[in-house]
Image (cartoon, rainbow, N blue to C red):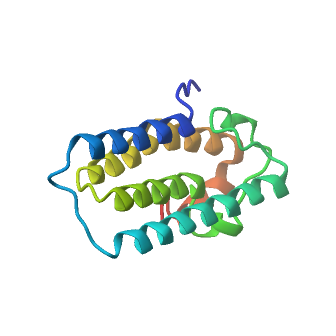
Amino acid sequence: MDLLIPPPVVFAIVAAAMWLINRAVDAARIDSGLRAPVAIALLIAGAFVMAMAVASFVAAKTTINPLKPTRASRLITGGAFRFTRNPIYLGDLLILAAIAVWLGQPANLALLAGFAWYIGRFQIRPEETALSKLFGAEYAAYCARVRRWL
């Protein structure tokens, strides 16, 4: 599997693009007293989901490296993985949503959709292929009961 762009780099590119759009486009910005509390809630939710996922990887003593899913030694189905097959990417998306809300720039919603599409197509699908080969029927059963995102 040739996954070339690490997901944290994709995250950073999207976050930087959001910031650049915010700097370049002033007219469309949404100002609301709800921006800060909603952004903080999304940030906390994203960080919590990611922390739960990392704790599950550590407890299972398996790889967390998104570029090497073939090195997985265990299929994790507990913790955050009971609700989403991709809690770290969901956490990334929630944190990016927090940034988008904080900045108040509606154009950043397109970047959220682009991030979800890109990660789904170029990261999650290859990971799913690798996990399917590694864990077979167990992984298929897991996929049947737990959604990719939520």
Q: Is residue 65 visible?
A: yes
* Residue farthest to the left, as pictured: 27
The answer to which quarter of the image holds residue 32 is bottom left
The answer to which quarter of the image holds residue 18 is top left
Residue at 25% in and 67% down: 31
Pinpoint residue 81: horizontal percent, then vertical percent. Answer: 64, 63
Residue at 39% in and 45% down: 115
Query: Which is nearer the eye, 132 or 21?
Result: 21
Pinpoint residue 111: horizontal percent, then vertical percent. Answer: 32, 46
Left of 106 or right of it: where is 127?
right
Q: Quadrant of the N terminus?
A: top right
Left of 110 or right of it: where is 44?
right
Pinpoint residue 100: horizontal percent, then vertical percent. Answer: 36, 56
Q: Is residue 26 above or below residue 16?
A: below
For the image shown, how many numbered marks are present on the structure? 0
Q: Is residue 146 visible?
A: no
Q: Is residue 70 above or below residue 77?
A: above
Residue at 57% in and 69% down: 83
